[in-house]
Image: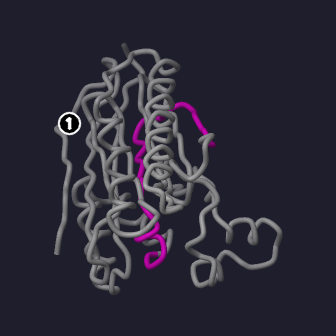
Amino acid sequence: MEQTTRLGPIAALAGRAQIAGCAATHVGLVRKVNEDAVLARNDIGLWAVADGVGGGYAGARASELIVTSLDKLSARVDPFHFLEDVRQSLNEVNRRLRTEAISSGENRVIASTVVCLLLSGQWYSCLWAGDSRLYRLRAGNFERLTRDHSAVQVLVDYGLISLDEAPRHPQANVITRAVGSDDVLQLQEREGEVEPGDAFLLCTDGLTRVVEDWEIGLPLSVLSATETVRTLIETTLQRGAPDNVSVAAIKVALSRHE
């Protein structure tokens, strides 16, 4: 089965942080086309996973265009301008996908979810649209930093279904935001300080639909970034991998001393 891995060397970031990150994507055991794409730019502090929607090669086109565009960005010491570069890149991809969809004349959708992690100095930023997720492990506490833009998340928010019911709900694959789905891209943002020993994990729903959150956090707490990615993809495959699956893991060793 098809698997793509992007592995960068341990990189120094702004003279303070040592970053070890890895990202991989696998087509799974059911789908014929991998509509996911991943990015691991340890050298500039940028990681992303994207999950194409629209079916087959349309979804693959959308996710790959996101990753290709982000991969062209250069390092920024200033977190604000780095975030703006990523935002502009995603907005440009959104415009291109909307134009392509209209030009096709088939009333089709060419879109993709995306979640990006940016590390600059002692700060992290996250931008996302859709149900691809970012988690953080800090001092033994594993938590999700993103909120799904999905139909079932709305039902959970209103108390109509439980979190446990959400993955099995008939509308589990309906997302409410994506790059390429609307003329104006709606990105959600979260940012904060990076602490010594933090670890981050980005993934598509091909992982979260078959692997529980606590199972995701466990390998991240004891394994390297590369081994964490490999272990989680192997676990997904052992459980049938009904969808494409993508994972990126990042581990940070941070010194408070200049």
Residue 197, picture quadrant: top left
Q: Is residue 137 visible?
A: no
Name the residue beneath numbered marker 1: 10
- The quarter in which the N terminus is drawn is bottom left
Where's residue 249, x and y in %? 34, 52
- 187 inside magenta stretch: yes
Vertical order, 89 against 47 (above or below):
above
What's the amino acid at mark 1?
Answer: Ile
Q: Which residues are magenta?
A: 186-211
The colour scheme is: one colour
Closest to the observer, 53 or 154: 53
Residue at horizontal 45 percent and vertical 43 percent from the top: 116
- Which structural element holds mark 1? loop
Closest to the observer, 215 or 75: 75
Position of 49 with respect to 29 (left or right) is right
Residue at horizontal 19 percent and vertical 59 percent from the top: 4
Vertical order, 83 against 129 (above or below):
above
